[in-house]
Image (spheres, rainbow, N blue to C red):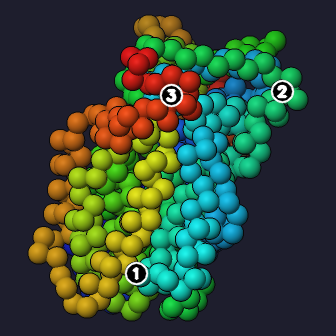
Amino acid sequence: MFRNVAELVELAESKNMLISEIMIQQEVSVKGRSREAIIEQMSHNLEVMEKAVERGINEEVKSHSGLTGGDAVLLQKYIKSGKSLAGDLLMDAVSKAVATNEVNAAMGTICATPTAGSAGVVPGTLFALKNKLNPTREQMVRYLFTSGAFGFVVANNASISGAAGGCQAEVGSATGMAAAAIVELAGGTPSQSAEAMAIALKNMLGLVCDPVAGLVEVPCVKRNAMGAANAIVAADMALAGVTSRIPCDEVIDAMYKIGQSMPTALKETALGGLAATPTGRELEAKIFGVSLDEEK
Amino acid sequence: MKYKSVFDIIGPVMIGPSSSHTAGAARIGRIARSLFGREPKKAVITFYGSFAKTYKGHGTDVAIVGGILDFDTSDERIIKALEFAKNDGIVISIKEDEALTDHPNTARIHLSDEKGEMELVGISIGGGKVEIVELNGYKLRLTGVNPALLVVHQDTFGVIASVTNALTKHEVNIGYMEVYRQDKGKEALMIIEVDQNLSEKIVQEVSKLEHVIKVIEIHD
């Protein structure tokens, strides 16, 4: 079993295998299930992600609270207008990440990746790249295993929970996972995947979890958008040969320590950050009839 | 290593919006249903901490009732769980409690019908993973991830050996085991996590062993 990114890369390189293959084989050995059953379950997860993206970019889903919904549709229209400054691929990833999280906020069906609040980044990037790289279905499933391999390391050495480590642990983890998977899908090496993960995660460090009214909508939906953009840029940098001066495992360790030293008010408690702004409090009072802060 | 499977990271497939507040809640409800062994007539659900503060916005109440109805985290019927419960004639009451708990996402579920009652406390620890920390007054640790056998028994010598011997005979591997007792010589509880779902035959065999009072099986 690999315990960190260095071991994961070493395993892949010494066996001349893709990162996704290392993850598949580990799952077979740890869970004692057949390779077919594991691939089948991941294919199902991929289908769920695809449906959520399709729904989000075509329907104006609205959340129960009314805080989010409809932005993915707006972004798709904007891309079609041809006026996008950042470029179609990047904005497509952004809109598809938003789509997934809007569906999530509206109590739709999604696949937690690694959590529900951060479920947009990995599918958002994947379905945007689909048009550019024309991957096979198998390669798309592999994208999820590669993401999973890097997420596995973060979950076991730092955290994938906003309540434990701030938003860096959720959207941050998802961003690093996606960056590493993009590299593999684009034909990069395992060590380039690790560089992309390091570069992406470094740029999410310190990100606080400050959900308005305690709901995973504001700022979470738009943070998924930024995570998707960040992941693509980090992957491009790694593919260009740029390396991270701080090795990936040390970045993950830094993330863990930052999470530990972050005050409770900034870890999914709705007591600080955007949740504690005048507008945040106003929205909270509107949704719940009373501010959580006043109640205390 | 806290996480062992890639599907802890890419998954679960679930109804949004929160893996802790929705999927985790549904899983706690479903474990309660599984331990109760049948659909209850009455369910009293008490929320603590973050669950108490945000359950309305996250649909935590709806999700937990969905779990009690035996719906999976991805079952779309979860959204209308309160209606399904009403149609089945289940009386649901939701309470909020200010009491401080060890974990911010804590729920207490009391299920009952004319045949009996059961109470458990579950916590949602992130990414949809949950633990049961109390069952009918026993403090315990049960993740619900692996199949498990819960054996209520008389606290006396030889019972643990006879139960594990029965599992050995059927080539069942024990992954994790703990024994809880409230008082020496009184009623005790064994929690045995195993590698595969157990057949009815094995469960029957264990429940017939001397000093064994009750056996509950949890499928994964």
Secondary structure of the residue carrying tag 3 is: helix
Can residue B190 be seen from the camera position used here?
Answer: no
Residue for point 75% across, 36% down = B81
Q: Nearer the viewer, mark 3 or mark 2?
A: 3
Which numbered disc covers residue A86? 1
Disc 2 marks which amino acid?
Lys
Dot 2 alpha-carbon crowd within 10 angstroms: few under 14, some 14 to 19, many 20 or more: few
Q: In this view, does B7 lie to the left or right of A77?
A: left
Foreground residue, A266 or A138? A266
Task: Determine the CA span between mark 3 and mark 2.
Answer: 30 Å
Disc 1 marks which amino acid?
Ala
Question: In the rendered structure, the residue with mark 3 lies on which chain?
Answer: A
Dot 1 alpha-carbon crowd within 10 angstroms: few under 14, some 14 to 19, many 20 or more: few
Residue for point 69% across, 17% down = B93
Foreground residue, A102 or A201? A102
In this rendering, the answer to whether A227 lies above or below B59 is below
Disc 3 marks which amino acid?
Ala
Q: Which of marks 1 and 2 is in front?
A: 1
Q: Are marks 1 and 2 in contact (CB under 8 Å)?
A: no
Foreground residue, B41 or B217? B41
Residue for point 41% across, 29% down = B104
Percent across and percent down for residue B165 are 54, 37
In this rendering, the answer to whether A2 lies above or below A273 is below
> Do pointers 1 and 2 mark residues of a single chain?
no
Disc 3 designates what residue? Answer: A285
Of the numbered discs 3 and 1, the one sitting upstream in the chain is 1
Which numbered disc covers residue B86? 2
Percent across and percent down for residue B70 are 73, 38
